[in-house]
Image (cartoon, helix red, strand yellow):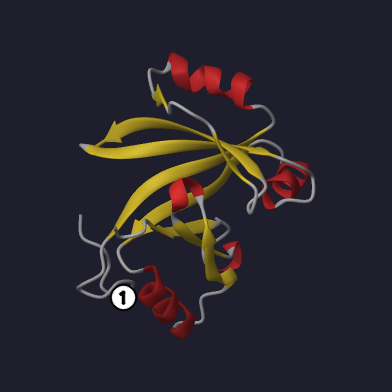
Amino acid sequence: MECPKWFLSDNMKIRLDHIGIAVNDLESSGKFWRLLGLLQSEEDEVNLEQGVNIRFFSATASGNPVRIELLESLGEDTPVGRFLTKRGQGVQQIAFEVDDLDSLIVELLANNVVFTQPEPSIGAGGSRVTFVHPKSTGGVLVELLEFRKE
């Protein structure tokens, strides 16, 4: 399936990277994903900048790897902490990996897309991330990420 031309230039590639789920506890929430047969990452990750403990599970969809990211808040005054307080456990964001995050941000801003913060920060695995505000997406927080080129 091709990406819509109105969204991405011919040179831009995008793929579903993961679905982020806000949870109260990584251990109890992870049990279900293990029972499904998803592979758990070897180590959890702590992201102090985002205020979360992170655990990834991996699966394959249509031959492409897709990950489930469980997000356990480090406190109530973090993005995931506020999400849990307001909405409870559940899907917190959908994340797409892009080739050129900076160019995509410029393109989206030129089309009046609203970001929670347009300047990228550091995400899981050292990726550069930014988040599109749900008011620009029909109610879904969208994470855009780019892995650093070596």
Front one among 21 and 75? 75
Q: Is residue 36 above or below residue 143?
A: above
Q: Is residue 118 above or below residue 60?
A: below
As drawn, the residue found furthest toward the bottom would be: 110
Q: Position of residue 74 (x, y in %)?
A: 72, 40
Image quarter of residue 60:
top left
Q: Position of residue 19 (x, y in %)?
A: 47, 43
Q: Is 69 left, or right, of 53 in this rendering? A: left
Residue at 20%, 54% (x, y): give it.
1
| SS type, badge 1 | loop
Image quarter of residue 4:
bottom left
Residue at 26%, 75% (x, y): give it.
9
Residue marked by disc 1: 6
Residue at 49%, 57% (x, y): give it.
143
Q: Position of residue 59 (x, y in %)?
A: 33, 30
Residue at 42%, 44% (x, y): give it.
18
As drawn, the residue found furthest toward the top would be: 35
Q: Is 72 left, or right, of 61 in this rendering? A: right
Tag 1: amino acid: Trp
Local packing at callout 1 (Cα closer than 10 Å; few below 14, some 14-19, many 20+) is: few
Q: Is residue 82 above or below residue 34?
A: below
Please state the total of marks drawn on the protein image: 1
Q: Is 75 left, or right, of 111 in this rendering? A: right
Q: Position of residue 15 (x, y in %)?
A: 31, 53
Split into 4 quadrants, where in the image is the C terminus? bottom left
